[in-house]
Amino acid sequence: MLLPALKLLRYGLGNQVSRRILSLGLGFCDECKMSRLEHAMMIYLGKAEANSLSCKGYSSMLSTLIDLGLNVFGVDRRPFSQYFSESTTRRGLLAVVRGIARYGVTKPQLLDAPFLVVWNLTDACNLRCRHCYQEAGSKKQDELSTDEKLKVVEELAEAGVVSIAFSGGEPLMAKDFFDVAAKVKEEGMHLAIATNGTLISGDMAKKLKTVGTDYIEVSLDFAEAESHDDFRGVKGCLRENFTRSSKLCQGGNLHVYSNNSN
């Protein structure tokens, strides 16, 4: 479904008439509490109702535009709507559509907001990795408060960011991690975490699943424990990585990559 959608965006919405219609939806609607384009897309997908005549009129134009494109490329509306009904894929679609409205079809496609934001949530960390560019270890005195972090999430969501990836330091050492993570999911964004894996107990794995984590990445630097632990600065951390990270595998969202070919 993704490839036909990309063709629709490129060839069906990239002309001047379509861009003009899309541009009309870039403004914010105070009544709907979102952009007209986003609201019209949600109406098309059956996720919202029109609250005013102007919203109804614009959603009708957008629906006609999308349906014409789907017909041209032989795409059935039902699987298209099902695919983009999920909040993250819908936000991704809107990011591309807004980019086309503002800049036309470009290579690579220009967007009006970053697709992904990597957020070093805290400098606190329980390892002492040689390659650390954050000089992490202890929490810094000037780190954002919980309320400030939640406000940042709101601002990123409002800007149209699709995905937030938490890193650090070790993001799971932030006492307010799950408050902030829950806010990310509440705003409909994709939630990713880059962690050293040593803090993932059975209870932690359940909490990560419950909050709606979409992607978890644990990095391993060496296959041999001695070399890995020396590089990470803490003896026994490779064993912790394998033991604790395995608790995530059943969920199907654990990705392990190697930083070192050794």
Image (tube, rainbow, N blue to C red):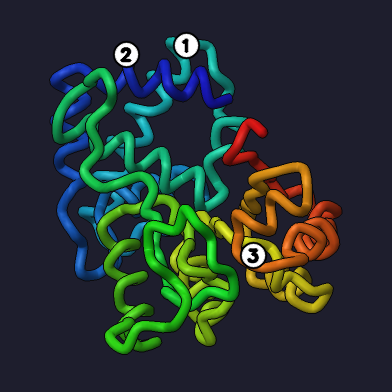
Picture coordinates of residue 126, whole percent (x, y)? 59, 75
The local secondary structure at tag 3 comes to loop
Is any part of residue 47 visible from this angle?
A: no
**242 or 180: nearer the viewer:** 242
Number of residue marks: 3
Above or below 64: residue 42:
below
Local crowd size for mark 2, using a 10 Å CA cut-off: few (<14), some (14–19), many (≥20): few
| Mark 2: amino acid | Tyr
Q: Which of the marked residues, 1 or 3, is nearer the chain's N terminus?
A: 1
User: Which mark, by number, is residue 73?
Assistant: 1
Q: Which residue is mark 2?
A: 11
The three-letter amino acid code for the residue at tag 1 is Phe
Element assignment for label 1: loop
- Which one is in front, 126 or 44? 126
Name the residue type under label 3.
Gly
Q: On the rendered structure, is 8 left or right of 211?
A: left
* Residue 42, x across and y down, in percent: 43, 51
Location of mark 3 (residue) = 212
